[in-house]
Amino acid sequence: MIKIAIVGTGGMANVHAENFKSQDGVQVVAGCDIDETRVRAFCTRHGISQHYTDFATLLAQSGCDAVAVVTPDATHAPLTLQALAAGKHVFCEKPLATNVADAQKMVDAARSSGLINMVNLSYRNSSAWQRLLQMSVAGDLGVIRHVQAHYLQSWLTSKDWGDWKTSPNWLWRLSSAHGSKGALGDIGVHILDFATMPVGKVSSLFCKLQTFEKAPGNTMGEYTLDANDSAMVIMEFTNGALGSVAVTRVATGHKNSLFLTVYGDKAAVRIDLDASYELMDICRIGHDGCNQPWERVYCPKTPNNYVRFIESIRSGINQQADFERGAEVQKLMDACEASNALCAVVAL
Ligand SMILES: NC(=O)c1ccc[n+]([C@@H]2O[C@H](COP(=O)([O-])OP(=O)(O)OC[C@H]3O[C@@H](n4cnc5c(N)ncnc54)[C@H](O)[C@@H]3O)[C@@H](O)[C@H]2O)c1
């Protein structure tokens, strides 16, 4: 039996609890949150026997083998380092950290401990994306010269996910003092991983971040609404390929949409997660040298991150996406912030 503890028992923790509990030979043994009412309700809801408000006590007493870190972004690094020091495998929410120095400390600690480490880049659960990655590695797309990706949400312009003005779980995402890196850190992390992994290393980028006026003085109670709401990134890869990534919370009409198109000189692949996690569209260059009609391809489901984390613990072989990849994406996000501040292209 693999025993999991979950730290941070807000919205996303429910997804973790369901995905771990549903696996054979896995038990969620403890929950921890600084809010006692919340952790009690969470543990009752999921039939978890132990609840804690102090993480050190959980690590010492719960008997867990692994910890899922599901707290606001700025707490990922300290909680993960504490868990690794206590000999626990760690499944950490994204973004891995809020800067590359902290992310690198997490990589180093995980490496020297030999413990399993994964970052929950959850759109890797798309089997279409996994197939795209395989095709890219195998050279099936030929030389990739162009990539385009969008991650579009609308929770600042719609109430589909509740009213952000009265919901602490949305308000902290708007405030750097509450540990947020804005839309770039929240959803940019996913799409930067999604767009760059099949293409290769980024050599330089330009980024523009935008924070919109959302309240008088951009303040609501204890929250200063200073985190970015939109980001546009233009990237150059080491092979000269160019890429563009758009990220926003104000895309009316899009609740949670990810689009990716990768163009190689042998084939292009298009993925639209609104349509399906298991479908991709492919256009190949035919024997006549012409674009063949776009073809829809079904990619059978692949294990999700929660399953791959448990498989990694069982086998001792760390599956994707590990902390090293989390730190690579963090480096891109730090470069985006630097580029925005300098209004200049930044080399990586
Ligand atoms: N992978 C994904 O697709 C995905 C989706 C949603 C959220 N997330 C990530 O999950 C994390 C949590 O997001 P959420 O939507 O559940 O937020 P949330 O605000 O609903 O929950 C966060 C919880 O953490 C608790 N907390 C804060 N600091 C703590 C600490 N030091 N120790 C223990 N508990 C602490 C809060 O009291 C709260 O209950 C974020 O990092 C977010 O980026 C990932």
Image (spheres, rainbow, N blue to C red):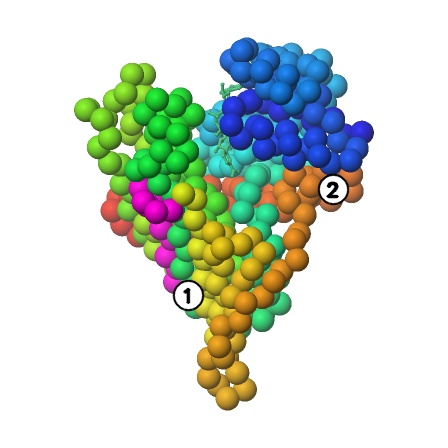
- Residue depicted at 52% across the width and 83% down the height: 286
Start-end of magenta stretch: 241-254
Asked if the residue at label 1 sits under 8 Å from ligand 1, the reply is no
Report which quarter residue 228 is drawn in: top left
- Residue depicted at 32% across the width and 32% down the height: 227
Q: Can residue 46 be seen?
A: yes
Q: Nearer the viewer, residue 301 or 132?
A: 301
Residue 170 position within the rendered picture, expressed as x and y whole percent measured from the top left = 39, 28
Residue 112 position within the rendered picture, expressed as x and y whole percent measured from the top left = 67, 34
Taking the image as shown, residue 230 lies to the left or right of residue 185, namely left
The answer to whether residue 297 is above or below residue 40 is below
Residue 265 position within the rendered picture, expressed as x and y whole percent measured from the top left = 48, 75
Taking the image as shown, residue 57 lies to the left or right of residue 295, namely right
Q: On the image, numbered disc 2 is attached to which residue?
A: 311
Q: On the image, numbered disc 1 is attached to which residue?
A: 146
250 falls in the magenta region: yes
Secondary element at tag 1? strand
Q: In which quarter of the image is the N terminus?
A: top right
